[in-house]
């Protein structure tokens, strides 16, 4: 299991003259924990118009202690277990779980919160000796250690004012990789174009730091393409036909399989026709995608009006059903039939088989750099 440290910052204001607590979640950790009103004393809490948790305890006695169990809850929405505690400097205020003596206000007093589990917290205020004033409260959640990566700030450079480029031009895609864990590690960031993984970059990120990864992508056909890094959206690239009639322009058609069904260990030929419909000679790189991942490429050079057929031959060792395409043109589904086996094992075997394409090799090499990933997690990256 991949371990990580989840550090969630929740800023809370407590106005105990008319005690109000408003919680906001740091955007890097918005998906790890969620706050909700409690069941028994949830009347003190509500979700305000800004989507923040607001707690209002407006009936406190002067020079008295007021205790309210189950005022709000914390749910671990992440897929990793965590240890949770709170930190604050609010005089006369105690945050507890269960019994008021069971405070959770330091790392040493942290409680375990499993993935999917919900914990109820109470609020105790003592106005006898303390001068209760507004302040900040921070909720922290910590995993078992190790790197914890998040990709943010995906940007596309090299576009014109309309967000477009011409066929044959390149765009530069950058993204920030943050390591929110307690250990440094290497992350393999995937560039996706219309959901297909077309390139990968490996970057080492020390604990608590950020690094930038950069991709260059040449767009060879007109259209609108959604660009993302690790499924973090970056925007749309519009590729326009070149205004000059003498520029090369390519079309891919008639993608097909030599057979729709083979036995494990057999080969299948994937063919497609490439046409240069433009007015000048140029080079086009045909890409074979299996299951949405480019595993092999084939460059072709065509003069104006010329066509050629590209053929990819690939061996499938394990049973399963594979969606196959060439540069976005669907060739069909290939059924590899054999008793036993599974689709997961089939994809894992394909990752282990030799690939002559540069993109396929770089994908596997980059994926092997990911620390603490098992084959099923690697499969998840492919999807």
Image (cartoon, rainbow, N blue to C red):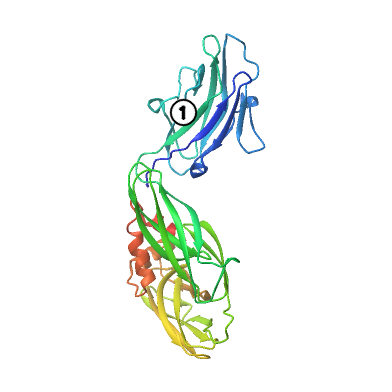
Residue 380, x across and y down, in percent: 44, 57
Q: Residue furthest right?
A: 49
- In this rendering, the answer to whether 244 lies above or below 348 is below
User: 174 or 308, which is in the foreground?
Assistant: 174
Measuring 53% from the left and 91% from the top, which residue is drawn there? 305
In the rendered structure, the answer to whether residue 16 lies left or right of residue 369 reads: right
Residue 279, x across and y down, in percent: 54, 88
In the rendered structure, the answer to whether residue 273 lies left or right of residue 340 reads: right
Measuring 56% from the left and 36% from the top, which residue is drawn there? 24
Q: Residues within 10 Å of mark 1 (few under 14, many from 20)?
A: many
Residue 167, x across and y down, in percent: 53, 76
Query: Residue 349: in sight, yes or no?
Result: no
- In this rendering, the answer to whether 380 lies above or below 162 is above
Callout 1: helix, strand or loop?
strand
Measuring 35% from the left and 56% from the top, which residue is drawn there? 203
Query: Residue 354: in sight, yes or no?
Result: yes
Residue 321, x across and y down, in percent: 47, 69
- In this rendering, the answer to whether 352 lies above or below 20 is below
**Res 311 quadrant in image:** bottom left
Q: Residue furthest front?
A: 161
Residue matched to label 1: 86
Measuring 67% from the left and 37% from the top, which residue is drawn there? 49
- In this rendering, the answer to whether 187 lies above or below 83 is below
User: 255 or 321, which is in the foreground?
Assistant: 255
């Amino acid at each position: 299991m991949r371990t990580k440290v989840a550090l969630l910052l929740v800023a809370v204001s407590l106005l105990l003259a008319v005690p109000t607590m408003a919680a906001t979640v740091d955007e890097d950790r918005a998906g790890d924990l969620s706050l909700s009103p409690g069941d028994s004393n949830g009347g003190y809490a509500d979700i305000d118009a800004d989507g923040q948790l607001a707690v209002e305890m407006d009936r406190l006695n002067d020079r008295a202690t007021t205790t309210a169990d189950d005022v709000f809850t914390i749910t671990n929405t992440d897929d990793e277990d965590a240890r949770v505690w709170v930190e604050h400097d609010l005089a006369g205020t105690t945050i507890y779980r269960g019994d008021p003596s069971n405070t959770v206000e330091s790392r040493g007093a942290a409680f375990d919160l499993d993935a999917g589990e919900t914990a109820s917290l109470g609020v105790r205020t003592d106005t006898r000796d303390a001068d209760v004033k507004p302040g900040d409260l921070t909720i922290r959640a910590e995993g078992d250690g190790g790197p914890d990566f998040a990709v943010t700030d995906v940007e596309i450079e090299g576009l014109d004012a309309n967000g477009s480029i011409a066929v044959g031009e390149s765009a530069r895609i950058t993204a920030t990789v943050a390591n929110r864990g307690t250990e440094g590690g290497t992350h393999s960031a995937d560039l996706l174009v219309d959901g297909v993984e077309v390139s990968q970059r490996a970057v080492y990120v020390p604990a608590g730091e950020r690094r930038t990864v950069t991709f260059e992508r040449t767009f060879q056909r007109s259209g609108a393409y959604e660009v993302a890094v690790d499924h973090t959206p970056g925007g749309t690239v519009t590729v326009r036909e070149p205004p000059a009639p003498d520029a090369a322009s390519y079309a891919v058609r008639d993608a097909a399989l030599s057979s729709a069904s083979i036995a494990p260990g057999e080969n299948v030929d994937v063919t497609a026709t490439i046409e240069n419909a433009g007015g000048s000679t140029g080079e086009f790189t045909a890409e074979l995608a299996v299951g949405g991942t480019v595993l092999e490429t084939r460059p072709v050079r065509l003069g104006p009006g010329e066509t050629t057929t590209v053929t990819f031959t690939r061996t499938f060792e394990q049973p399963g059903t594979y969606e196959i395409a060439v540069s976005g043109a669907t060739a069909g589904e290939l059924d590899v039939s054999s008793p036993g086996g599974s689709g997961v094992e089939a994809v894992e075997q394909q990752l282990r088989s030799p690939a002559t394409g540069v993109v396929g090799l770089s994908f596997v090499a980059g994926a092997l750099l990911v620390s603490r990933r098992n084959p099923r997690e690697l499969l998840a990256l492919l999807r």
